[in-house]
Image (cartoon, helix red, strand yellow):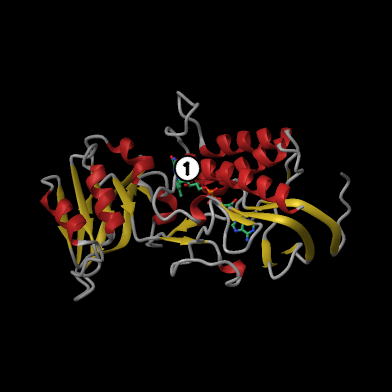
Amino acid sequence: MLSVRSTVSEEIQEIIIIGSGPAGYTAGLYAARAMLEPLMFGGYMSGGQLMLTSDIENFPGYPEGIGGPEMMVQLREQAERFGLTVEDKNVERVDFSERPFKIYVEGEEFLAKSVIISTGAEAIWLGAEGEEAQKGRGISVCATCDGAFFRNEEVMVIGGGDSAMEEATFLTRFADKVTIINRRDVFRASKVMYDRANANPKIEIIPHRQVTRWLSDEKGLTGAILEDPRDGSETEITVTGAFIAIGHKPITAFLDDQIDTDEEGYILHSEHTMTNVPGVFAAGDVVDTRYRQAVTAAGMGCQAAMDAEKWLEEHN
Ligand SMILES: Cc1cc2nc3c(=O)[nH]c(=O)nc-3n(C[C@H](O)[C@H](O)[C@H](O)COP(=O)(O)OP(=O)(O)OC[C@H]3O[C@@H](n4cnc5c(N)ncnc54)[C@H](O)[C@@H]3O)c2cc1C
């Protein structure tokens, strides 16, 4: 199918995929193999969050591990081989009020019978001095992904919620010592999660501390300057790893409340991977408040494409 795109495209796509992470590319692969000639808008970060990381050791099929960007190039090539078209552009807004759905991209309007949203969720970083240079060199936002790199080392977890407690407890499998710091002495974590972390002999919990500056040498992270927000006094902590667990932000603002989400903005499924708008599906971290892994995002991308294919068969 030859597509000629002007300001308003007259061609109606069977399926438009928004987002080019593991969820989007897997949805693209399945939709392309189902002969739906999918069109993808890859967004401001083509390839998704794994473009930010060097070693992926937990995606099946890579016994030696693989670099994040390399893996994402492979996922893209695999889907393109079967007919996925990728445009690395940002979707600015959508109109799901009637079918075909309208997708607005850099001044152009595209029409689609079905849509898969796979725009992910950004981890919230602290933004403390020296952070940018140490991302992936000691500072992480994913203990499941990076914990094993800190065997017999001393690490720190920043946050006071359930994720921080869970990450700290998980990290004690590898690290000799895990220090949890939290800005206040009130913890958002459930009592059971807090108590479990607090009872772990490898974990020390220090309230009233926030990172003002990261310390490093040529090998990577060496520690941080911590401030007590009550009086501004400073102490230094020595750690080679730090895990920021202060939350994630799903990328759903461009949907302008047309899709049902929870109070944090994560998209809610109403039937399998379909949203409250029939014909609009969602997959990956933009839905997932629990697992947030490449393999789970890819798995949900597959489900969304299969659900969209079935829905199109029934509603075309
Ligand atoms: C530093 C780091 C290391 C990690 N390491 C691992 C690991 O080792 N193993 C593991 O399993 N997981 C790891 N993860 C988690 C993993 O990256 C995510 O679970 C996974 O990428 C989620 O995939 P996704 O397709 O849902 O979304 P993402 O990968 O977040 O992709 C979202 C996509 O949506 C696009 N997008 C956003 N807004 C728009 C828009 N308006 N229009 C068009 N496109 C848009 C973006 O450009 C991007 O392409 C890591 C995460 C980080 C941050």
Q: Residue furthest bottom?
A: 231
On the picture, is 123 further left or further right than 72?
A: left
Q: Nearer the viewer, residue 77 or 95?
A: 95
- Residue 183, given in percent of the width and then of the height, sits at 25, 68
Q: Residue furthest front?
A: 314
Of residues 105 and 206, the one nearer the viewer is: 105
Quick check: 181 above or below 66?
A: below
For ligand 1, tell me if the residue under mark 1 lies within 8 Å: yes
Neighbourhood count class around disc 1 (C-alpha, 10 Å): few under 14, some 14–19, many 20 upward: some
As helix, strand or loop, the secondary structure at mark 1 comes to: helix
Is residue 169 depicted above or below 229 in this figure?
above
For residue 310, above or below residue 131: above
Q: Amino acid at mark 1?
A: Thr
Q: Is residue 21 visible?
A: no
Residue at position x 25%, y 46% from top?
155
Residue 181 x, y percent position in the rendering: 23, 59
Residue indicated by mark 1? 296
Q: Is residue 169 left or right of residue 41?
A: left
At which x and y percent is residue 214? Answer: 33, 56
Count of marks placed on residues: 1
Q: Which quadrant, please, contains the N terminus?
A: top right
Tell me the residue at 32%/51% (across/down).
Answer: 243
Left or right of 58, for residue 68: right
Instruction: Name the quadrant containing residue 72.
Output: top right
